[in-house]
Amino acid sequence: MTTRAGFIALIGEPNAGKSTLLNRMVGAKVSIVTHKVQTTRARIRGVAMEGQSQLVFVDTPGLFQPRRRLDRAMVAAAWGGAADADVVILLIEAHRGVTEGVERILEGLTGIAKGRKVALAINKIDRVQAQVLLALTKDMNERFAFEKTFLISAERGHGVDDLRQWLAGEVPEGPWLYPEDQIADLPMRMIAAEMTREKLTLRLHQELPYQLTVETENWEERKDGSARIDQVVYVVRDGHKGIVLGNKGETIKAVSKAAREELEEFLGRRIHLFLQVKVRENWQEESERYSEMGLDFKDGN
Ligand SMILES: Nc1nc2c(ncn2[C@@H]2O[C@H](COP(=O)(O)OP(=O)(O)OP(=O)(O)O)[C@@H](O)[C@H]2O)c(=O)[nH]1
């Protein structure tokens, strides 16, 4: 059967609903893997499978009026992500219509539209009347030649399946960019552990043997909406502990910060991440032996 795969950039003003839509489309099938398929300028936010098509969503920071230097850099990064994508989806808010911000994005879109498909998704349709949607669809399509317009509510899920199915047919034919076993349905605790492991691997390069595991031991929801996550980094030898900790603990601190930031962005809320390093010798052999015996292996301490 023919497989398809491609990069999709979701662009829009801050608050347009990009994260909500992305989480809807990717669902539980989130891929966080160490050996990411890298695009030149964008980060991978998630991977969704639709039939034989693999949809790889790339990150684009909010597009807004560049005032300060930092903002300009962010806008450049956002357009970079879009320019690398096979399909670009412009997400706008139904009740806000064609804002100045949307007008500016449309100008930018003209510059990168060549060679890629651009669709319009009007989000938050739950907030307006049907006539408003008709008028907005017409107005936007007079301003730009969109391939297609989708009327959606990312929050409620309306129209999201249609959009995903359309994307599946639009990405180019070709092999999948991620092996299928890397986009398993992962529970959140595992995803969180994987994020930390990825940061460790990036930071330590080849310095440590590949036998380094991270487990989420505890996940505590807090009243203020944040969560406390406790993780243990298991190494196989006492000597490895120092490498993971780094000089004055600087390695583990940097890893913890990077992982926390990614978790916060992914979950859209504040996270308190606590990492501990422990030695677990021969954990893998033991784990295999125990599971052969039909027992669940829980840490060896
Ligand atoms: N009423 C309504 N609200 C929505 C819908 N989709 C998203 N929202 C809300 O809009 C707000 C912004 O959504 P996000 O997904 O965080 O927006 P974003 O585009 O990722 O925002 P930035 O990260 O600032 O770029 C949130 O409060 C969502 O709950 C929708 O379909 N209907």
Image (tube, helix red, strand yellow):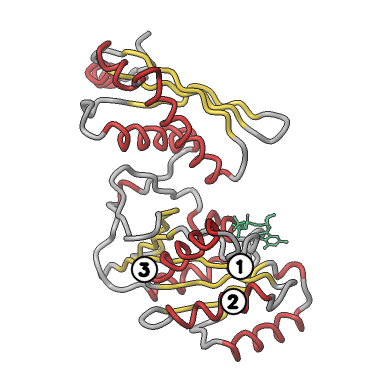
- Identified at 59% across, 76% down, the residue is 104
Q: Quadrant of residue 64?
A: bottom right
Q: Is residue 12 left or right of residue 237?
A: right
Q: CA distance from mark 1 to mark 2?
A: 8 Å
* CB-based contact (under 8 Å), mark 3 and mark 1: no
- Identified at 40% across, 24% down, the residue is 250
Depth-wise, is mark 3 or mark 2 nearer the camera? 2
Residue at the front extreme of this rendering: 69
Q: Quadrant of residue 172?
A: bottom left
* CB-based contact (under 8 Å), mark 1 and mark 2: yes
Say what amino acid the circle numbered 3 marks: Asp
Instruction: Name the spot of residue 120 as percent of width and height, x first.
Output: 56, 77
Q: CA distance from mark 3 to mark 1?
A: 21 Å
Earlier residue among tags 1 and 2: 1
The quarter of the picture where the C terminus appears is top left
Say what amino acid the circle numbered 2 marks: Arg
Which residue is the site of mark 2? 104
Q: CA distance from mark 3 to mark 2?
A: 20 Å
Depth-wise, is mark 3 or mark 1 nearer the camera? 1
Residue 85 position (above or below residue 208): below
Which residue is the site of mark 1? 65
Earlier residue among tags 3 and 1: 1
